[in-house]
Image (cartoon, coloured by chain):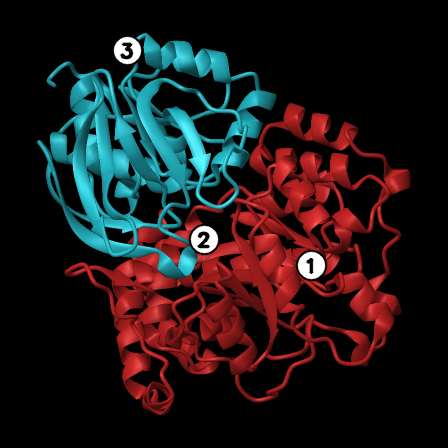
Amino acid sequence: MKVGVLALQGDVEEHGHAFRAAAEELGVEVEVVRVREAGQLRDIKALAIPGGESTAIGLLARRARLIDELKSAIEGGLPALGTCAGAIFMAKEVRDSVVGETGQPILGVMDIAVVRNAFGRQADSFEVDLSVEGLGAVRAVFIRAPAIAKTWGSAKPLAYVDHPKLGRAIAAAQEGAMFATAFHPELTTTLFHKALLEAALGRR
Amino acid sequence: MSVAEGFEYLEKLRDFFYGLAELRDRLKERGFRWPKPYAAEAAATGTVKVKVGFPAMLRNGVIMDVTNVEQAQIAEEAGAVGVMVLDKLPYDVRKAGGVARMADLKVIEEVMSHVTIPVSAKVRIGHYYEAFLLEEVGVDLIDESEVLTPVDEQHHINKWLFTVPFVNGCRELCEALRRISEGASMIRSKGEAGTGNVSEAVKHFKALYRAINELAAAEAAGEEERLRDYARQCQVPLELVALTAKMGRLPVITFAAGGIATPADAALMMWLGADGVFVGSGIFKSQDPKERAEAIVLATSRWDDPEAVVEAQRMVSERASMAGIDVKALRPEELLQTRGV
């Protein structure tokens, strides 16, 4: 089975590594494709959008004329996981905690509202144990992370984080075969990549 | 190779060095705490995963040197993954001479409030207090840089003491491993900053990967003695050498820096194994900074796609490139790369 990682900018290698480790645990064969062109979307059964800078990923996707193609592939049911910048890229509503409206290119496929840099700057980045509904316990690494401010429609929260400054925020959400996390599961766990592979195999 | 594989050992290394640091207790008396107390249970800031994980998010990206808010906004709109705030671009540091120090805090804070991407700044080698100030102001990454005038000829900063990640320069593997053992969360080549000449960065990357490939081969062949000799030669822990050999790369993100001036320069450095690039004087010392910034971002992201690199190189004109300096024309005392080894 071919799975893709959007390879414009960000921790693409870490997602590839997590996909391969998840596949080994599930006992399935995967080939990880670095997705940069619309044509590659036809062959893959699942897509990860990595962490990185969402502005850089958005601008590069627009230059490669990938935005519409990605949007229709995900809306057409391609299982997708967006972590951190990836979650920002998938959200329908985005703003920044410091500068407000950003006007950056986004896919806008998931019924979530995301606040960029919500927990503060890098010195405020943290790791914490979280319990994710349906998946289990994870060590979650939040790096200059966004917060999911709300979900609506068929999107539902999967995990919450309690933060001294921000209070209770949504850390992960799911809508059908779309997953969005404010943290970076690719650095510490295979649970989300396994869920994505299971969705691709029709087991979820 | 995912850097996540190095986390466990780097955590051990941190504990070891941190345990040794008498400085910690002296600093604690003055109110510096590490790790910072955190309200939520079992949550922690400034951990290895957080500090080494952050540069992983900058992969295939470009960090651009800027001296003011306008330049920082041009960088952000071009798709930079970060900006490095300086008082003077390295080219001008070279021209000006004298002592080069950390940038104005006011300028750094102003940039921080106007862009959404990470903001870094440089401190002088060994200057703990410039680093404490930057951590207090809240920059996202500190570059302990040979471009500024070193204050300690013998020692670098013990970076395990800080919550903020540090990037350090290197010319070869031993130097990189020494910096990692001191707590650097990211490594870059030194190159020869402010020259617009990428030749030294090429030399440093080739030296780095030649040594790593030799160690990887020794590891694969079970020649543990060679790893031990190398660790002794570099004066770094054997485990760090073994980890590097096993991973076949440095266990932290490795960027290219020093003299990158064109999209083709950036693509070349990515091809040589860089995870991303720093561009110093190359953008804002050129006549076409806006186009050049976008072009270098494109070439860095898609360096292995010849069509994209051609498209990027077409976006700039060689007539607009910074003039540059031949490294051979510099006197030994004018070289920046020999500072702090």
Q: Residue at x 20, y 54 (%)?
A: A128
Q: Amino acid at mark 2?
A: Pro
Write down the quadrant of residue B241 in the picture. Answer: bottom left
Q: Is residue A43 visible?
A: no
Q: Residue at x 19, y 30 (%)?
A: A157
- Residue B208 visible? The answer is yes
Question: Between marks 2 and 1, how big is the CA–CA gap?
Answer: 18 Å
SS at mark 1? loop
Label 1 resides on the chain identified as B
Q: x%, y% of residue B182? A: 43, 76
* Residue B90, position as x, y percentages in the image: 75, 63
Q: Amino acid at mark 1?
A: Gly
Report which residue position mark 1 lands on.
B258
Q: Label 2: few (<14), some or many (≥20) within 10 Å?
A: many
Query: Which residue is labeled 3 in the image?
Result: A77
Give the alpha-carbon distance from disc 1 to disc 3, as whole Å.
45 Å
B281 relative position to B187: left or right: right
